[in-house]
Image (cartoon, grey):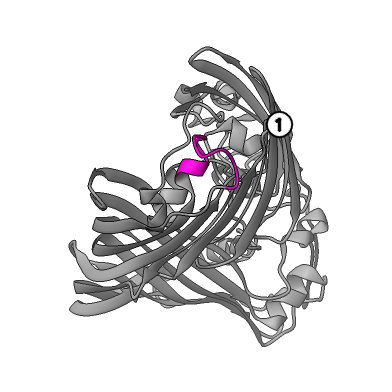
Amino acid sequence: MRTGVVIAVLALALVPLRPAHAQFSLDARRIGMAGVSLGRDGSARRYNPAYRAVKNLSGGVGQAKATIPIPLGLITFFQDHPPGKWGSDPMFNPDSTAFNPIELMNLILNPPLYYELKRAPTPTNDVEFTIGKNQLIMNLGQTRVLIPEETFGLGMNGRLLDLGMNISSFHVGVMGFLHYEVEFALDSALRHVLRDTVPVQADSSYRIFTDAVAQTGFMPTLSFAQRLTHGKPTIPADSLEAADDGLYIGGAVHYYLGATYARGVGPAGFTVGNPIFGATPTVVFDGTVQSSNKPFGKGIGGDIGIAWISGPFEVGLGVNDLGAELTWSDTKVQRIFYDPSGDSLSVTTLSPHSETKTKLPISYLANAALRMGTGTTVGADVFNAGRQTSVHVGVEQRWGPFALRGGVARDQRKKMQFGFGGGIRFGAFGLDAGVFTHSNSLSDTRAMTLATSISVY
């Protein structure tokens, strides 16, 4: 048991080690432009309430009313991993000698919806151990690149749906929200052992410090959007773009109803004696866990937004979840620790019923687009979901039913990514394909994915 826990602690050091968050979309057109959205679609309205007063540009300028993904990646995945055989599949079976937890984590970070043209390499499990009476040296080989030099983690604050109806300048509806953050930090001693192949020292302790929070729920929403001014058209007054010229403002009030909440804080690790193999290493695991006994965590917050349109040019900015603090009236606080005397994990309830307050981080979306008469549309956006900022720039060129797209992006890991693609339209339907690079894995090497979808105009 003790040896198993020590190995688990070491494996914990190899979970998501850098800020990694996918710019995920079901639209191959958007993917072919490296993630930027050129339309006044759900993303703009979801994060900028001012856009609820702006007409959608469906149809005439190539903006689809709906998108249906073609999941080629799922077909390949289920061929390689038949659902009825997952119990014996090395990817999902820890008892298999071919089981690789890094490969499984890469699958979670990068769901196989689309077809992988180039997979990110998975560092192997092959490691070298130098073991003596009072010596332990671990050489993790390729896997050392996964060991961080500072605090690492992942997280997001996203909106999962947006349903409702418009009544004049008002919108009544409901949104879903999901917020999670996971932070890890290795102490210097453990980092040097894992990353720099430094020998384990006698009478020493090695720790990983963890702070993780997750909360999700829905929020009934009342928003208001209004066109303040009508601009002076710089293009023919009867054109679609000229009819939208002006300044728009918007705001929204949300009543948050959190469905569930959990937070865990605490160290994990082990302590060795002298000599280091004179006795089994002592496992250190002592954390505090908070969790909601029942829904709902309640709170009030809001969004503000502004958009300006002048002929073919538009720009917008939306800021979300201002003042969003949830109060959970009934939460449980427990201590989970490893008891060496019983060689087992023990759970002690510190407070069966207590009140807890949580906050949603402020997020924002800034976007700009320029539509030219030659069938060219250029756009960019800057998005921050409360943790790291991503930037996307893309362009689309149309010639009748044909479209060519491309784009670049800086993801939340501050790595440059690229996209390109195209499509063809047949009346009310279109077939689109987009290729994009990404770093949604534990490796520094980029992967390349092909996305396909059907557009309905």
Q: Does the magenta stretch include residue 237?
A: yes
- How far across and how far down the image is residue 221, in percent? 25, 57
Considering depth in this image, is 130 or 31 the residue closer to the camera?
31
The amino acid marked with disc number 1 is Thr
Q: Does the magenta stretch include residue 353?
A: no
Q: Name the residue under label 1.
A: 374
Considering depth in this image, is 77 or 69 the residue closer to the camera?
69
- How far across and how far down the image is residue 371, in percent? 63, 41
Q: Is residue 143 visible?
A: yes
Question: Left or right: 206 with respect to 232?
Answer: right
Q: Is residue 120 visible?
A: no
For the record, the magenta segment spans 234-243
- How far across and how far down the image is residue 103, in percent? 64, 44
Considering depth in this image, is 221 or 5 the residue closer to the camera?
221
Residue 436, by quadrant, is: top right
Q: Residue at x 52, y 12 (%)?
A: 427
Residue 276, by quadrant, is: bottom right
Q: Which residue is drawn at 23% across and 58% down?
A: 222
Kindly state the secondary structure of the residue where label 1 is placed. Answer: loop
Question: Left or right: 72 with respect to 227?
Answer: right
Question: Left or right: 170 with respect to 53?
Answer: left
